[in-house]
Amino acid sequence: MLSTKTFTLKSRLLLLALVLLSAIKGYSQQTRSVADFDRDWRFHLGDVSDGQEVSTTDNNWRKLNLPHDWSIEGEFSKDNPATPEGGALPGGIGWYRKTFTIPAASKGKEVYIDFDGVYQKSDVWVNGHHLGFRPNGYISFRYELTPYLKYGQPNVIAVKVDNSSQPNSRWYSGSGIYRNVWLVTTNKVAIDHWGTFISTPKVSKNEATVNMQVKLHNASGKPQQATVTTAIYDAAGKLLKTVTNNVNIVDSSATATQQAKVLAPMLWSDVHPYLYKAITKVSLGKTLTDIYTTNFGIRYFDFDVDKGFSINGVSVKLRGVCDHHDLGSLGAAINYRALQRQLEILKDMGCNAIRTSHNPPAPELLDLCDKMGFFVMDEAFDVWERAKKKYDYSLFFKEWHKRDLEDQILRDRNHPSVIVWSIGNEIPEQRRPIAADIAKELAGIIHNLDRTRPITTANNNPDTSNKIISSGAIDLAGYNYHYKDYPTFQQRYPGKKFIGTETTSALETRGYYDMPPNIDSIRRWPVKNNYNDHVNMNPDNTVSAYDNVSAPWASTHEESWKPIKKYPFLSGMFIWTGFDYLGEPTPYTWPSRSSYFGIIDLAGFPKDVYYMYQSEWTDKTVLHLLPHWNWQTGKTIQVWAYYNHADEVELFLNGKSLGKKAKKGDDLHISWAVPFQPGTLKAISYKDGKTVKVAEIHTAGKPAKIELVADRKTINADGKDLSFITVKILDKDGNLVPNADNKVDFKVNGSAFIASVDNGDPVSHDPFKANYRKAFHGLALAILQSNEKAGNITFTATADGLAPAVLTLQAK
Ligand code: GAL
């Protein structure tokens, strides 16, 4: 039995714990809440009259969770108004509605809805009140809900998305609320939307100056005396510094300027992406009204006329890629893991920079680049006033460019990864005097908000007729293509700084190889009259995966990288593109519906040239052989090897040496002409006579079995996480069958569903939302998504005539 004394002590402790707990709970309720608002929406494809009215019935609409892209669910057709350039998928109009309840406790608070991106021309209503229209499909925006809300009762948000005016894009845009949505609740006095700005103007080994601007929003209707305290924490969570200011908010807003010194700072870079945290608290007297976290990095960088780019005093080439926003078979619908996987694949190749062509990215991309160590060129526009497509953003530029550009800068300026703002890609007016005026205006808009990063434009006419470069408005002369002019850049533009905003545009189909004599010469494809000609593309729309085919305005991977590598004043390059993307199957030749430009295909499988970059851009020891080894006996096969860390490579066919070869001068690969015999092709690289690495390819027999390889076998049971399963068609000895195109059927049981399937074939019109896929050059992909329930997942792949495969995974 408990003595009274012990009981009293225990109950007191319990009471104390309860008080503390409720204080903590109350504490979080008293300040800001940012809630995921993605669940339980209703969707209707097509226009609806009175879709915004509360009384409209939506319980027969489809129930879904955001992010959502309705185009990716559609059927490919060359007659879709987006055209194959836009991905050949349907656009149209769609409506979304969500019914939600705001607790009575939120009365007196400010409530906002934040959209990370809606493509495009969205109108938003709450309880029948029109909140606004936003034409730009890539910008993040917020509406205030407060005046229209009912507390403790149902409220209805309605969103009309209009992607019916087509074509409006030169690539696949997707349609719908394709990025995340948040419900934000704050007190009347709180930090404003994107209200902090942190910069590090002075950085040395010993000390960094951290400047902070904190913009406060005051909706109380009366002047307020606020206390703003920012605490800086290192990555381990250790408190380093605290700064406090008293701020007199006379009107609806006021900005606190704070400064702190961080001693012996850990510097952020691509190889050391170290992040600090600033936690800002706002109080009115003794009442805490807001807590707001800003992640930031401490770093300095420079673009030098002669020495190119450096980070924290160390010269580094920008080894970048351009990427569009789609996530292959998942479409435009943002998924954190899918983005992270793309960046992991790029990191493994040695890539250290991303250009968000040609629009503001999903905010998650910048978070990932901060964490993983990628430099970012954050781009605003593909057009200004002159159109590229009949219904593109040029229709809205005049009215919206200021607002859109400001919002992009405010949202993105705390990311250490962002090192360049690009205010335009291949702007059609670049040779007209008006371009200088617009460039100056846009640069001015940025300078008002951020003076810590250089500004560029990506110019396809980068010669001296370019009015943007000569305007003085931009800091870096951006070259799209024109690789032959790189070496003489300094003569053309004395005193200016170079950046290869867009390079390469080589084309390849993964796993497909044209044999001699075609491969002996580089093909600018297509070459005849205009770039829509079907010249040199094979009749089945394949393009050889030897790096010897490029768009006519462009160059192969090797041609582009060689000068960038050679000249220190060339700060770096952004290759078009890292990944194949939906749309722009240059030339726009049906039945192709996605691009061939990627170093990695649409499913995420590397093409051979990936290993050229890996051999040049990483410390990994590389020896990669191409092509596959299934040919007609006697046919002469061009064998290529990409390698590093070695002096020479010896090739053997069925044990017989075919000689040693070594790269000479600026060579990036070596090659042999080999009369084909089935068997084993083996390469050994040597350094000082010692073996460095061995690579082997075997002639594969008939398809016999399926192998499944998951990138992750344990995923989060959060309804969002993904496992990417590579499906391989093997012969009986376990060799990948290079031309296998077996149709594979998938079944999933347990805590996941199939989010999409793919194989990287730019010509396939099979749906991405399906439970089957044909292999393409021996490979297919199935993407599993967790369904919010923890437990086992059993994934089965079967195909006629092949031994099936089963994989067990887990959602936790
Ligand atoms: C560039 C353009 C890119 C893409 C690429 C294809 O001119 O900036 O968006 O179209 O060509 O080569």
Image (cartoon, rainbow, N blue to C red):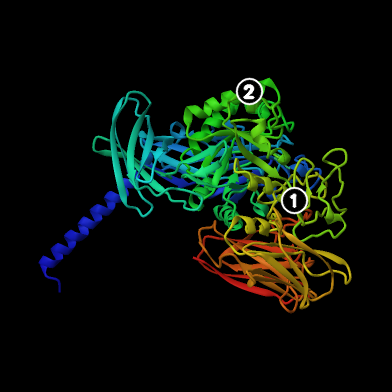
Using residue 676 as the reference point, say whether residue 503 is left or right of it.
left
Instruction: Give the label on residue 596, or none.
Output: 1
Q: Amino acid at mark 2?
A: Ala
Is residue 59 shown to the viewer in this render?
no
Looking at the rendering, which quadrant does residue 602 occupy? bottom right
578 and 680: which is toward the camera = 680
Q: Position of residue 495 (x, y in %)?
A: 59, 31
* Separation of marks 1 and 2 at Cα, in angstroms: 34 Å
Q: Amino acid at mark 1?
A: Tyr
> Residue 481 or 225: which is nearer the viewer?
481
Residue that carries the numbered disc 2 in the rendered image = 436
Q: Is residue 177 above or below residue 618?
A: above
Residue 528 image offset from top left, x and y in percent: 88, 41
Q: Residue at x 72, y 77 (%)?
A: 803
Q: Residue at x 67, y 48 (%)?
A: 561
Considering every residue shown, the one lying at the far front of the view is: 688
